Image (cartoon, rainbow, N blue to C red):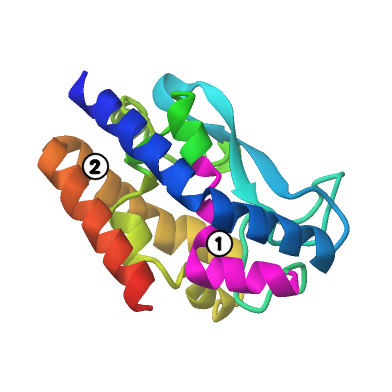
Amino acid sequence: MPKRLFDIVLAAAGLVLAAPLMLVLAAWIKLDSPGPVFFRQERVGRHGRAFLIHKFRTMRHDPAGLGPQITVGGDARITRAGAFLREAKLDELPQLLDVLRGAMSLVGPRPEVPRYIAFYPEALREKILSVRPGITDIASIEYRRESELLARADDPERAYVEQVLPEKLRYAEQYVDAASMWLDIRLLWRTLRVVLTH
């Protein structure tokens, strides 16, 4: 399975190279606000199997998980360290661990929470969930400023479900239809270029 081998090799190399930075970020998160370093949340993965995604925590610790499941620009829950991590996309680094354990791929449709999977059209749901979800994909690049877009909406969650989610599904379907190693390499390069140039 070339794609799986590709994921393992790059994710392992990425973790080794990023380890010093991740240690510094972890210390900053702990010093900046009380709570754990990592944020874990249930997402829906390949074939509809649930898994816990890992990110660096960017919001105030909420053990009850009562806040909304989407984030808009200027969300009061975001910490000082979290604002930087989100802007630089460094909060996604721990997902390399999810790639190593097989729950995710480097490239693939972004995994959603169960609440929003319910809005997938049935035929499209099966198609998109036939592949491992990824750290990055076409929609991640095109909707990099999603939180700012939603912040301008009167009802951010409704805007997400009715405007953003259908576009993300369209991009996800395009990825599944055209999936190849070369497409993954191109999307990884585009993602790195966007993050580094920003």
Horizontally, residue 154 falls left or right of residue 9, namely right
Most frequent secondary structure within the magenta stretch: helix
Q: Does the magenta stretch include residue 180?
A: no
Whole-percent x, y for residue 182 in the image: 11, 43
Q: Would you place residue 79 above or below residue 129 in this image? A: below
Q: Is residue 92 magenta?
A: yes
Report, in whole angstroms, how far the alpha carbon at label 2 lies from the one at label 1: 22 Å
Mark 1 is surrounded, within 10 Å at the Cα level, by few (under 14), some (14 to 19) or many (20 or more) other residues, namely few
Nearest to the eye among marks 2 and 1: give it: 2
Whole-percent x, y for residue 53 in the image: 58, 38
For image coordinates 49% across by 24% down, the residue present is: 101
- Residue located beneath label 2 in the image: 173
Whole-percent x, y for residue 49 in the image: 51, 21
Nearer to us in this view, 21 or 57: 21
Q: Give the range drawn in magenta.
A: 79-95
In which quarter of the view is residue 79 placed? Answer: bottom right
Whether residue 179 is visible to the viewer of this picture, yes or no, is yes
Type of the residue with mark 1: Arg
For image coordinates 41% across by 25% down, the residue present is: 46
Whole-percent x, y for residue 121 in the image: 37, 37
Which element carries disc 2, helix, strand or loop? helix
Horizontally, residue 83 falls left or right of residue 135, namely right
